[in-house]
Amino acid sequence: MKPVTLKEIADQLNISVTTVSKALKDYPDISKKTKALVKELAQTLNYKPNAFAVNLRTKESKTIGLIIPEIVHHFFSSVIKGIVAQAEKKGYLVIILQSNESYELEKKQIQLLLRQRVDGILISLANGTADYNHLTDVLAQDKPLVMFDKIAKLVKCSKVIIDDRKAAYVATQHLIDTGCKRIAHFRGALLPQNSIDRFLGYKKALLDNNMPYDPSLVYICECGDNSFEEGKMNARQLLKDHKDVDGIFINTDLVAIGAITEFNEQGVKIPEDISVVGFSNWFMSSVISPSLTTIDQPGYLMGKTAFERLYKEMQQVKNKKPIVYKDVVLETGLIKRQSTKEILQKTQH
Amino acid sequence: MKPVTLKEIADQLNISVTTVSKALKDYPDISKKTKALVKELAQTLNYKPNAFAVNLRTKESKTIGLIIPEIVHHFFSSVIKGIVAQAEKKGYLVIILQSNESYELEKKQIQLLLRQRVDGILISLANGTADYNHLTDVLAQDKPLVMFDKIAKLVKCSKVIIDDRKAAYVATQHLIDTGCKRIAHFRGALLPQNSIDRFLGYKKALLDNNMPYDPSLVYICECGDNSFEEGKMNARQLLKDHKDVDGIFINTDLVAIGAITEFNEQGVKIPEDISVVGFSNWFMSSVISPSLTTIDQPGYLMGKTAFERLYKEMQQVKNKKPIVYKDVVLETGLIKRQSTKEILQKTQH
DNA sequence: CTGAAAGCGCTTACAG
DNA sequence: CTGAAAGCGCTTACAG
């Protein structure tokens, strides 16, 4: 069963393809009668315009590309959901690609999307991405590109992020406010901007509170996959290296959950012996024991907002206006749970 | 900066578009010299074939559609990952759509994908889907359609599933083997096939062990969203209704985790007072306390396999052969953890 | 070995 | 109010 074309409708009605096309699109210069006839037949034949032909003519695909480091991931899957939902509302389809945190794959995927002539690209960078030529290539073609969460500050394009530095500051301050004196940090991989920013927020909170910054308390993971195992390993190492640590701010909830599991296994009491704060507020964090104090990171909203930005830019391109770049910073919040102690009364008289 | 076309390459080289096209595709009737010239220029100009034009000519989009009930979901996101990875290997792009468990949305999305002229469709049905015309429409167009996980048995197409009935039987048998005498079941929504099959497996295990089947021990959730809250609610209700229940087989891990949380809060001991078995082996289940005994459901493999099936069918269509439908049943396994007791010794003499 | 020509299915400026 | 014609960027059967 071959799909129905305009020509078939035209032939059956003994009118021209032009008229059929215009009738379906409600051009004002077509008679009401013709329109009704055409629409009815299109309906009964179940006519669907051939997207390839339409795209070829209009140079629009109504499709966007999405490149994400990892799909099986609470935060990222929430972002995907936000993007897909918002895109559908505006009549756009989303092609999804996963970079697996690989720079090489990411580069290849950008090429794939460009070849596919998507109208715009949404990307969260792989940890390994340090070279941005593949991204500036996109921008050079006046193809809208919006980064979210894992971004490159140096690339000139719109970005949707949270204030990682501030959020990390709040997390660390909370540890301090609850009485922690010696606070470690699991920072994950070295490169990604949000890893850097969270580290800086941690450091600043220490210094602002006149606490010494000790680099040996910062655990970097070369693999940098932010995994459960990474948390377990780091926690084990920490217990060997620094028996005096009484608080940890951890880059990502999953890593924090790994750490908590290790502490539980070794009989280290949370929060009595060590307080733990995570980052992202994965659903899991509310149900483990003890439940994890963490930073709430609005994934769905970030996806929605990123698409909205991209949409604006795609409109600008369509209207032959210059693309206006804009950064959007979303709010985060601290979720207090059982892995940190009560805030000390600041009783002074 | 407008994308480069074949014509531009042809003009610069003073040859025809035909020759350029053939040279790039390594047709044997083009001279080595010409091929080298064309390829070099294409490279320097960063030529990328216009996918719309290619698709329009070849009637192939090298794109497939994926409709899934929920993206933020451990099992489904694993499936997505498997599909996307395998598709990319074979040179296909994936358009992702989320039905939100809504039949209406699902129907609309099928239309969207058909309009987009995807080469094939992968779908896991919404809970509410009871009418299959939108699916048979796809099949009637000789467009490959493969269902996975949440399928409709009545629709004639390839399916990739697990043996839900058998897996549920194994789960229930495990409860029996560990000494449970009165076993409840949280079955979730009424309609979906796997909900039905898991229930039947539960029931059969009881009967095969000469245990009475008591319908009042089966908790159906009309909302049927398989949520954490559903688990808490059902557990609360169960404690009111049936104080003698000492084991539960629960449809989905997330619901089981909700139940465990409720039991923990009410001081009901797991597995001493009540043993719990879940279904799916979400990552979360290994880190909660007590960790959850569950059925391992191979999400990534299911995604990969579903794409492979679709790929075969797309090849058949391409080669003008009839589509051969096939069901693939993937293996599951029981993961024993802390939420169930040790298996009783079957000492008989 | 090379190229002119037709055509995929649409849209739209233009003529009548 | 209707339609002939050009063209989007490719591919491929055919001629030379």
Image (tube, coloured by chain):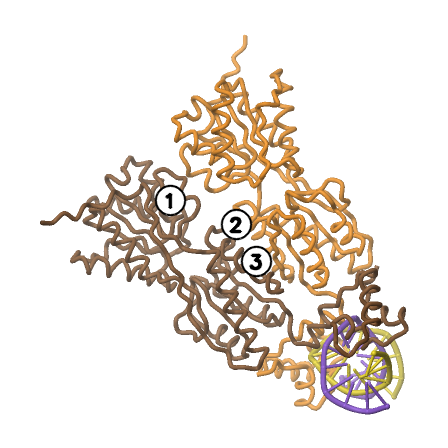
Chain colours: A brown, B orange, C purple, D yellow
Q: Amino acid at mark 1?
A: Ile
Return the chain for callout 2.
B
Q: Position of residue A78 (x, y in %)?
A: 49, 54
Residue B72, numbered circle:
2
Return the chain for callout 3.
A
Residue B31 visible to the viewer: no
**Mark 3 crowd level (few <14, some 14–19, many ≥20, 10 Å Cα):** many
Question: What secondary structure is marked by label 2?
Answer: loop
Q: Residue at the spot x=52%, y=36% of the render?
A: B230
The residue identified by callout 3 is: A85
Q: Residue at the spot x=84%, y=64% of the render?
A: A41
Task: Note whether A228 is above or below B62 in the view shown.
Answer: above
Residue farthest toward the left in the current orientation of the protein: A349
For marks 1 and 3 on the same chain, the one whose residue lies earlier in the sequence: 3
Q: Amino acid at mark 2?
A: Val
User: What is the tally of numbered marks visible in this picture?
Assistant: 3
In three-dimensional space, the C-alpha distance between marks 1 and 3, rounded to whole angstroms, equals 30 Å
- Answer whether labels 1 and 3 touch (C-beta < 8 Å): no
Residue B119 visible to the viewer: yes
Task: Note whether B343 is above or below A56 in the view shown.
Answer: above
The residue identified by callout 1 is: A257
- Image quarter of the N terminus of chain A: bottom right
Question: What secondary structure is marked by label 1?
Answer: helix
In three-dimensional space, the C-alpha distance between marks 1 and 2, rounded to whole angstroms, equals 19 Å
